[in-house]
């Protein structure tokens, strides 16, 4: 039965957001990544827009499954909202525009979403919560939970905003995406530097004697640059992660082995 002219309701958006929060990545694969998850979260609404079992619905499904699609889990519903606004208004005639929209926005939104929500916020609030937990303060747990609740609320809210704004949002965002991406990147680098100096605790404990004089290497390094050893360790980890075949798990084991060996030899200690 055709449902042409159907207008999405609040219940539709609630269903989209529930599906997005629990299943957007469920169909992830190496060939097309998030294409099936994207279709799954809006399939009930496509059935209402085009009619269940119609050729128009089949065409829409094939369109959404055809291209490679991969973007941020935190900003993907911006694309979803604009997409549904177009398909609700123009039906299958909008599918070419929708395909171009998905291709054009998935990269910039992935960059922004991953920088802010995938790196920056977890780095700041994760470190804050962890430090409070180390000190025995349970408030850190509730801060971390509250941050994630706010992020999920934002993920749901943007669906409504994108749907209401439609293609106007693309025009509005186009001039700001690069600036937002650059700002998030700079902030992320700044926070990584701050966390290195406050959370990576390692010092050179070796005090060799040269000509009967004890040389405190750590004092010399501190005069050159405070926290030079933690910065060097982080730089080393970044360097090995760039090697072919290296994974984060392997890098962790390498650092553990180096730390144990150097600590046993008395060359390094906890800062």
Image (cartoon, grey):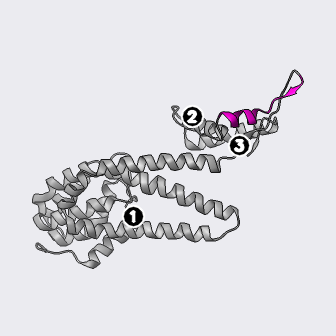
Residue 147 counted in the magenta span = no
Q: Position of residue 32 (x, y in %)?
A: 32, 48
**Residue ID at (48%, 66%):** 148
Q: Residue furthest front?
A: 223
Q: Is residue 253 above or below residue 35?
A: above
Mark 2 neighbour class, 10 Å CA radius: few under 14, some 14 to 19, many 20 or more: some
Residue 10 lies left or right of residue 56; in this view the side is right
Query: Which element is circle 3 on?
Result: strand
Q: Which residues are magenta?
A: 212-224
Q: Is residue 119 above or below residue 216?
A: below
Which tag, 3 or 2, sits closer to the chain's start? 3
Mark 1 neighbour class, 10 Å CA radius: few under 14, some 14 to 19, many 20 or more: some
Q: Position of residue 60 (x, y in %)?
A: 18, 59
Which residue lies under the disc numbered 2? 240
118 or 179: nearer the viewer: 179
Q: Is residue 225 above or below residue 133?
A: above
Residue 218 counted in the magenta span = yes
Query: Which element is circle 2 on?
Result: helix
Residue 178 lies left or right of residue 244; in this view the side is left
Rendered image quadrant of residue 171: bottom left
Q: Is residue 70 visible?
A: no
């Amino acid at each position: 039965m055709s449902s042409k002219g159907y207008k999405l309701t609040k219940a539709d958006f609630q269903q989209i957001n529930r599906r997005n929060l629990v299943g957007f990545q469920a169909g992830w694969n190496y060939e097309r990544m998030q294409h099936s998850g994207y279709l799954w979260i809006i399939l009930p609404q496509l059935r209402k827009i085009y009619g269940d079992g119609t050729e128009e619905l089949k065409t829409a499904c094939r369109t959404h499954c055809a291209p490679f699609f991969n973007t941020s889990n935190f900003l993907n519903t911006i694309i979803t909202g604009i997409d549904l606004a177009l398909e609700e208004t123009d039906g299958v005639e909008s599918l070419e525009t929708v395909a171009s929209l998905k291709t054009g926005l998935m990269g910039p939104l992935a960059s922004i979403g991953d920088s802010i929500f995938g790196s920056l916020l977890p780095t700041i609030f994760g470190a804050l919560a962890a430090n409070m937990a180390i000190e025995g303060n349970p408030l850190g747990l509730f801060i971390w939970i509250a941050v994630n609740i706010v992020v999920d609320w934002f993920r749901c809210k943007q669906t409504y905003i994108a749907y209401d704004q439609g293609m106007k949002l693309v025009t509005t965002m186009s001039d700001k995406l690069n600036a937002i991406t650059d700002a998030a990147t700079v902030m992320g680098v700044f926070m990584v530097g701050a966390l290195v100096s406050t959370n990576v605790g390692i010092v050179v404990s070796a005090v060799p004697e040269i000509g009967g004089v004890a040389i405190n290497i750590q004092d010399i390094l501190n005069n050159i640059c405070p926290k030079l050893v933690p910065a060097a360790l982080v730089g080393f980890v970044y360097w090995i992660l760039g090697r072919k075949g290296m994974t984060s798990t392997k890098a962790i084991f390498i650092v553990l082995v180096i730390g144990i060996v150097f600590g046993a030899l008395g060359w390094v200690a906890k800062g």
